[in-house]
Each structure stands twice: as structure tokens, then as C-alpha cells.
Image: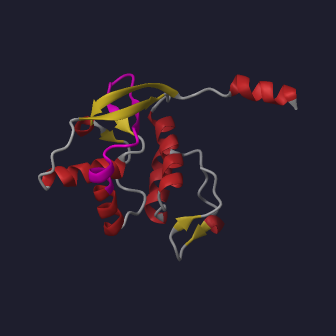
């Protein structure tokens, strides 16, 4: 048991490589479309929370080492909420906290995004399937027994 714990500690490394304040308007969203659902009520709750509680959780980002583009891994709806708040005249900060996550490439960053999505939101079956097929080809989606068509969500699949 002790040997296993030592091996686990040796192989367990943090992907967090830094933190900074970044201009949220310059983030690229790694997903083309929203592969998850957020109701209008939930969007309104998010905006109210952001105005009341401010920006309490950093956005996880990955910077492409070649293009230097910074991609948001988990801030899709917070950024969309900020865009809507700015359009309605709210005064928002230019810089928000961001945590840089190490990824070898965009495909690996997108794989992490699918993990963030599965933890934070309900996943829309169709959008998620298209998203995974485009960016995470290592997941086999030919077995549809895990697809729940009534709720259009994935169940019991490890992403």
C-alpha cells in the first residue's frame, strides 16, 4: 500500500503552470458552439451572482505555444454573461483572474474542457457528440447504449 501511494505521488503532477489577470475580451472560446445547456433563468442567476459576488472563481485558460492565443477552458458562460452585462451598460473590470493550465496541444486542452463541462453543466447530447467527435476522436461514440434520448444527456461515460 505504501509503495502504491509513493508511485501515485510520483506520477501525480499539477497542470497549473501559473496565474495572472487577463483581459476577458481577448479570450478565444475553445468550443465552436455551446455543447451544454444553460437556461435563460440560469444565465440571469449567473449575471446577478457576478454583479453581487464579483468574479470569485478564476477562469482556466490554455495558451497555444505557437499562436500565443489564450483559450478559455471553462469560462464560456461567464464570458457570455459579461458580454451581456457590458451591452446593458454595466461597468465591468477589464482584467479577470485566470489560471494557466498546461496542455500539449489544442486537442488535449479540448479534452480537459469536456471534463469541465461534465462537472459544471448538463450536457446536451447532440452538441456534445459533435464536439467530442471533432476534438476528442479517441472516445468511441459508436456504442449508443449510454445515450439517454429523453434527456439528451450522456450517462455513465468516462470522458
Give above or below for 101 relative to 79: above
The residue sitting at 47% across, 41% down in the picture is 110
Viewport quadrant of the N terminus: top right
Range of magenta residues = 49-70
Horizontal side of residue 117 vs 30, given as left or right = right
Residue 32 appears anywhere in the view: no
Q: Quadrant of residue 130?
A: bottom left
Q: Nearer the viewer, residue 57 or 70?
A: 57
Q: Is residue 65 magenta?
A: yes
- Above-or-below relation of 115 to 93: below
Nearest the camera: 118 or 69?
118
119 vs 61: above or below: below
Q: Residue furthest right?
A: 1
Q: Residue furthest bottom?
A: 150
Residue closest to the far left: 89
User: How many badges with numbers are in the image?
Assistant: 0
> What percent of the width, then of the height, locates residue 31?
38, 47
Query: In the figure, residue 127 lies in which quadrant?
Result: bottom left
- Compared with 66, 43 (above or below) is below
Image position of 95 (left or right of 60): left
Q: Is residue 75 left or right of residue 80?
A: right
* Location of residue 54 in the rendering, given as x and y in whole percent from the top left corner: 30, 46
Residue 70 location (% of width, % of height): 34, 32
Q: Is residue 150 magenta?
A: no
Relative image position of residue 155 (x, y in whole percent)? 61, 63
Going 53% across and 53% down the picture, which residue do you hit? 119
Q: Which residue ends up furthest to the front in the rendered image?
A: 52
Image side of residue 92 versus residue 47, left or right: left
Residue 106 seen in this snapshot: yes
Task: Give the residue drawn at x 38%, y 27%.
Answer: 64
Write the residue at 70% across / 26% down.
11
Amino acid at each position: 500500500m505504501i509503495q502504491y501511494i509513493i508511485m501515485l505521488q510520483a506520477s501525480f503532477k499539477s497542470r497549473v503552470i501559473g496565474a495572472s489577470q487577463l483581459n476577458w475580451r481577448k479570450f478565444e472560446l475553445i468550443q465552436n458552439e455551446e455543447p451544454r445547456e444553460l437556461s435563460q433563468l440560469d444565465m440571469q442567476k449567473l449575471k446577478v451572482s457576478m454583479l453581487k459576488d464579483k468574479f470569485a472563481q478564476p477562469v482556466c485558460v490554455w495558451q497555444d505555444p505557437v499562436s500565443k492565443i489564450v483559450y478559455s477552458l471553462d469560462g464560456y458562460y461567464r464570458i457570455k454573461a459579461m458580454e451581456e452585462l457590458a451591452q446593458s451598460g454595466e461597468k465591468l473590470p477589464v482584467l479577470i483572474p485566470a489560471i494557466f493550465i498546461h496542455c500539449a496541444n489544442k486537442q488535449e486542452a479540448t479534452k480537459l474542457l469536456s471534463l469541465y463541462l461534465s462537472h459544471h453543466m448538463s450536457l446536451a447530447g447532440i452538441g456534445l457528440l459533435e464536439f467530442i467527435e471533432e476534438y476528442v476522436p479517441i472516445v468511441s461514440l459508436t456504442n449508443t447504449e449510454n445515450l439517454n434520448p429523453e434527456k439528451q444527456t450522456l450517462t455513465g461515460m468516462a470522458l
